[in-house]
Image: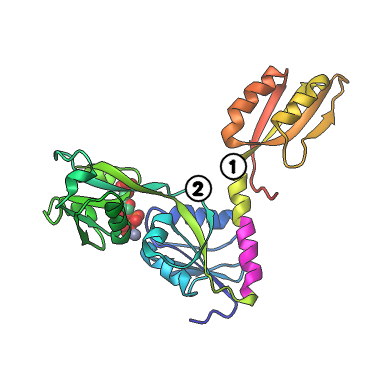
Amino acid sequence: MQSNGTIRIAVQRSGRLSEGSLDLLKNMGLQFETYQNRLFTRCRNESLDILFLRDDDIPEYVQNGTADLGIVGSNLLDESGAKVERMLSLDFGFCTLAIAVPEQSNYKSIADLSGKKIATSYPQTLKRYLADNKVDAEVIVLKGCVEIAPALQVADAICDLVSTGSTLRTNRLKVLEVVSKSQATLICTPNRSGGKKELIDRLLLRANGVLEAGAFKYIMFNLPEKRLKDAKVLVPGCDSPTVIPLADPQMVAVHSVVEEERFWEVVEKIKGCGGSGILVSPIEKFIR
Ligand code: PRP
Ligand code: ZN
């Protein structure tokens, strides 16, 4: 398929990653319309088409260059073995690939599944896991609705994705072992042609900016000038924090960024240094 310099990005058509994928693209400044059952949409402000595909097909489409970029669970990349570049872990779509068994069953560990049947859409990953654990079980490959296999007596156990856990609960199944962990991942085709490279690189920079913004908060506070040295260690910022004199010559205002995960620890230490009037706001974009 020729695309005349237009970039194509493949996202899941309907499923766990659809909403997060579209949110990311919008936060990257792409303007487009979507509605249910659409197959593709064209961006208004960039030379870019969004393709809506079955997630299982995305690694292959990106590998062969039909799509230049894709958003897909890392579990599918492990399974397909597609030769694509993993550019960014996207911090959403967290789930595990797990072996689950009927709630009422007596299986205690994976070893108990020797000689049993396990249904899955992830046969390669499951076979590797069984081999690593020296368990000789039969792998039944199903394309979908894996969770009903035990009830239909097609299999004794399943190996499937668990996100909220509600699919397992509905089907009276429980997790026996976690095989692997997954999150949404931005992938890029290895066949990047010259004309598209510039836009792909720009999009990657933007995706990074969106992720970084989510990982940081903007923080402002007042501080006795004599404690500035301590505060600089707490909130070093990108290069160095911004320090602004206040009307009271013994006080300064400090502006910086702080990692979301260190946020409370840093705020407590700022208070400990005599900081006051601590203001925190979200960052929309953050390009380092
Ligand atoms: C996975 C899996 C379950 C569901 C589990 O499907 O096959 O159906 O998610 O999620 P839960 O724990 O929140 O109930 P996926 O999104 O990969 O869609 P697909 O199987 O149709 O490709
Ligand atoms: Zn799928």
Is residue 94 shown left or right of residue 264? left
Q: Which residue is mark 1?
A: 215
In this rendering, the count of numbered labels is 2
Q: Residue furthest front?
A: 134
Element assignment for label 2: loop
Position in image of residue 91 (x %, y %): 50, 47
Is any atom of residue 38 visible in this view?
A: no
* Numbered tag placed on residue 171 in the rendering: none
Position in image of residue 268 (x %, y %): 63, 22
Measure the C-alpha gap from mark 1 to mark 2: 10 Å
From what the image shows, is residue 218 above or below residue 136? above
Q: Nearer the viewer, residue 35 or 255?
A: 255
Q: Read off the magenta span.
A: 196-206
Position in image of residue 256 (x %, y %): 72, 35
Residue under the point 58% across and 53% down: 27
Residue under the point 44% across and 50% down: 183
Q: Residues within 10 Å of mark 2 (few under 14, many from 20)?
A: few
Tell me the quarter of the picture where residue 229 sits.
top right
Amino acid type of the residue tagged 1 in the rendering = Ala
Residue 201 magenta-drawn? yes
Amino acid type of the residue tagged 2 in the rendering = Asp
Residue 44 magenta-drawn? no
Q: Nearer the viewer, residue 168 or 25?
A: 168
Q: Which residue is mark 2?
A: 91
Is any atom of residue 191 visible in this view?
A: yes
Rendering quadrant holding ligand 2:
bottom left
Q: Do the CB atoms of the residues marked 1 and 2 lie less than 8 Å apart? A: yes
Q: Residues within 10 Å of mark 1 (few under 14, many from 20)?
A: some
Tell me the quarter of the picture where residue 3 sits.
bottom right
Is residue 105 shown left or right of residue 254? left
Residue under the point 51% across and 51% down: 90
